[in-house]
Image (cartoon, helix red, strand yellow):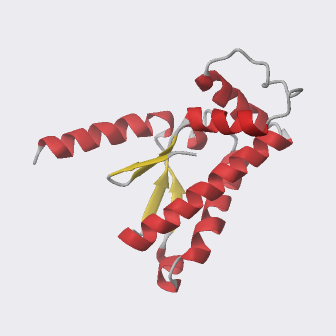
Amino acid sequence: MRLECDRGFLEISRSEVVRLWRLIAPPDHPLAASTQSPKEKALALRGLAQKGDPLAVELFDFQARAMGLHIANLVLALDPEFVVIGGGLMDPESTTDAFRARYLDLVRETAKPHLWPVQRERLTIVPSTLGELSQAIGAALVALYRSRR
Protein backbone atom coordinates (compact mmCIF):
# COMPACT_ATOMS: atom_id res chain seq x y z
CA MET A 1 0.00 0.00 0.00
CA ARG A 2 1.53 3.30 -1.02
CA LEU A 3 1.33 6.16 1.40
CA GLU A 4 2.08 9.67 0.29
CA CYS A 5 3.15 12.32 2.73
CA ASP A 6 3.83 15.92 1.76
CA ARG A 7 4.14 18.67 4.36
CA GLY A 8 2.02 16.83 6.91
CA PHE A 9 -0.54 15.36 4.52
CA LEU A 10 -0.76 11.56 4.50
CA GLU A 11 -2.85 9.89 1.84
CA ILE A 12 -3.73 6.30 1.06
CA SER A 13 -4.87 6.31 -2.55
CA ARG A 14 -8.08 4.69 -3.79
CA SER A 15 -6.23 2.75 -6.47
CA GLU A 16 -4.04 1.16 -3.79
CA VAL A 17 -7.13 0.05 -1.86
CA VAL A 18 -8.54 -1.52 -5.02
CA ARG A 19 -5.18 -3.15 -5.82
CA LEU A 20 -5.09 -4.72 -2.36
CA TRP A 21 -8.71 -5.80 -2.83
CA ARG A 22 -7.75 -7.71 -5.99
CA LEU A 23 -5.13 -9.64 -4.03
CA ILE A 24 -7.48 -10.86 -1.31
CA ALA A 25 -10.93 -10.98 -2.92
CA PRO A 26 -12.30 -14.41 -3.78
CA PRO A 27 -13.40 -14.78 -7.42
CA ASP A 28 -17.05 -15.27 -6.39
CA HIS A 29 -17.27 -11.90 -4.58
CA PRO A 30 -19.63 -9.39 -6.28
CA LEU A 31 -16.83 -6.88 -6.94
CA ALA A 32 -14.39 -9.46 -8.34
CA ALA A 33 -15.86 -9.37 -11.85
CA SER A 34 -16.80 -5.69 -11.79
CA THR A 35 -15.83 -3.54 -14.76
CA GLN A 36 -16.10 -0.32 -12.75
CA SER A 37 -13.27 2.22 -12.61
CA PRO A 38 -10.92 2.07 -9.60
CA LYS A 39 -12.72 5.07 -8.05
CA GLU A 40 -16.13 3.42 -8.49
CA LYS A 41 -14.79 0.13 -7.07
CA ALA A 42 -13.32 1.92 -4.04
CA LEU A 43 -16.64 3.66 -3.40
CA ALA A 44 -18.51 0.37 -3.84
CA LEU A 45 -16.07 -1.29 -1.46
CA ARG A 46 -16.69 1.44 1.11
CA GLY A 47 -20.42 0.82 0.75
CA LEU A 48 -19.94 -2.93 1.22
CA ALA A 49 -17.88 -2.32 4.37
CA GLN A 50 -20.63 -0.14 5.80
CA LYS A 51 -23.11 -2.95 5.14
CA GLY A 52 -20.89 -5.41 7.01
CA ASP A 53 -19.25 -7.35 4.16
CA PRO A 54 -16.52 -9.23 6.10
CA LEU A 55 -13.82 -8.90 3.45
CA ALA A 56 -14.48 -5.20 2.86
CA VAL A 57 -14.49 -4.56 6.62
CA GLU A 58 -11.19 -6.44 6.92
CA LEU A 59 -9.65 -4.33 4.17
CA PHE A 60 -10.64 -1.02 5.77
CA ASP A 61 -9.48 -2.31 9.17
CA PHE A 62 -6.10 -3.11 7.59
CA GLN A 63 -5.98 0.35 6.04
CA ALA A 64 -6.80 1.98 9.40
CA ARG A 65 -4.04 0.00 11.14
CA ALA A 66 -1.54 0.96 8.42
CA MET A 67 -2.52 4.60 8.82
CA GLY A 68 -2.18 4.29 12.60
CA LEU A 69 1.40 3.02 12.25
CA HIS A 70 2.34 5.81 9.86
CA ILE A 71 0.71 8.40 12.10
CA ALA A 72 2.74 7.04 15.03
CA ASN A 73 5.93 7.50 13.01
CA LEU A 74 4.99 11.05 12.08
CA VAL A 75 4.01 11.90 15.65
CA LEU A 76 7.33 10.59 16.95
CA ALA A 77 9.16 12.78 14.43
CA LEU A 78 7.00 15.92 14.48
CA ASP A 79 5.33 15.81 17.93
CA PRO A 80 1.97 17.39 16.96
CA GLU A 81 -0.94 17.73 19.35
CA PHE A 82 -3.56 17.07 16.68
CA VAL A 83 -3.83 14.76 13.68
CA VAL A 84 -6.78 15.36 11.37
CA ILE A 85 -8.02 12.49 9.21
CA GLY A 86 -9.80 13.78 6.11
CA GLY A 87 -11.15 12.65 2.80
CA GLY A 88 -14.11 10.56 1.78
CA LEU A 89 -13.81 8.06 4.63
CA MET A 90 -14.52 10.82 7.13
CA ASP A 91 -17.28 12.48 5.10
CA PRO A 92 -20.57 12.29 7.09
CA GLU A 93 -22.51 12.36 3.82
CA SER A 94 -20.62 9.33 2.46
CA THR A 95 -20.05 7.15 5.53
CA THR A 96 -21.99 6.12 8.60
CA ASP A 97 -21.15 7.24 12.13
CA ALA A 98 -20.32 3.61 13.01
CA PHE A 99 -17.93 3.25 10.06
CA ARG A 100 -16.06 6.46 10.90
CA ALA A 101 -15.90 5.62 14.61
CA ARG A 102 -14.54 2.11 13.92
CA TYR A 103 -11.93 3.47 11.50
CA LEU A 104 -10.76 6.22 13.87
CA ASP A 105 -10.71 3.86 16.86
CA LEU A 106 -8.45 1.45 14.95
CA VAL A 107 -6.15 4.29 13.88
CA ARG A 108 -5.90 5.49 17.49
CA GLU A 109 -5.49 2.00 18.99
CA THR A 110 -2.72 1.21 16.52
CA ALA A 111 -0.82 4.49 16.89
CA LYS A 112 -0.88 5.01 20.66
CA PRO A 113 1.23 2.01 21.82
CA HIS A 114 4.11 3.24 19.66
CA LEU A 115 4.17 6.74 21.17
CA TRP A 116 5.94 8.15 24.20
CA PRO A 117 3.67 8.35 27.29
CA VAL A 118 3.42 12.16 27.07
CA GLN A 119 2.42 11.93 23.41
CA ARG A 120 -0.22 9.28 24.19
CA GLU A 121 -1.83 11.62 26.69
CA ARG A 122 -1.62 14.74 24.54
CA LEU A 123 -2.32 13.48 21.00
CA THR A 124 -5.82 13.94 19.64
CA ILE A 125 -6.79 12.20 16.39
CA VAL A 126 -9.96 13.68 14.92
CA PRO A 127 -11.97 13.50 11.70
CA SER A 128 -11.95 16.42 9.32
CA THR A 129 -15.16 18.37 9.06
CA LEU A 130 -14.43 19.19 5.41
CA GLY A 131 -15.17 15.70 4.01
CA GLU A 132 -14.32 15.08 0.35
CA LEU A 133 -13.06 18.65 -0.05
CA SER A 134 -10.34 18.33 2.59
CA GLN A 135 -7.69 17.22 0.11
CA ALA A 136 -8.46 20.01 -2.35
CA ILE A 137 -8.43 22.59 0.44
CA GLY A 138 -5.15 21.17 1.79
CA ALA A 139 -3.55 21.30 -1.66
CA ALA A 140 -4.73 24.89 -2.11
CA LEU A 141 -3.23 25.85 1.27
CA VAL A 142 0.10 24.23 0.40
CA ALA A 143 0.14 26.18 -2.88
CA LEU A 144 -0.75 29.39 -1.06
CA TYR A 145 1.97 28.96 1.57
CA ARG A 146 4.58 28.07 -1.06
CA SER A 147 3.70 31.14 -3.12
CA ARG A 148 4.32 33.40 -0.10
CA ARG A 149 7.94 32.29 0.31
- Say which residue appears at 57% left-offset and 75% top-offset: 114
| Count of number-bearing discs | 0
**Relative to 123, 52 lies left or right:** right
Question: For the view shown, which residue lies furthest in the top direction?
Answer: 35
Left-right relation of 40 to 4: right
The single residue placed furthest to the right in the displayed view is 28
Residue 123 place in picture, x, y as percent: 49, 71
Residue closest to the far left = 149
Residue occupying image coordinates x 51% and y 67%:
72
Above or below residue 109? Residue 87 is above
Is 124 drawn above or below residue 64 in the view shown? below
Residue ID at (50%, 82%): 116
> As displayed, is residue 115 above or below residue 98?
below
Which residue occupies the foreground of this view, 99 or 26? 26
List the single residue furthest toward the bottom: 117
User: Residue 149, how many percent across, how many down?
Assistant: 10, 48
Instruction: Please report the residue visible at 67 percent of the width from the left and 39 percent of the height from the top.
Output: 20
Q: Quadrant of residue 110?
A: bottom right
Q: Is residue 58 visible?
A: yes
| Residue 32 vs residue 71, the one in the foreground | 32
Q: Position of residue 65 (x, y in %)?
A: 65, 58
In x, y percent, where is residue 120?
Answer: 53, 78
Q: Is residue 22 above or below residue 69?
A: above
Q: Is residue 79 visible?
A: no
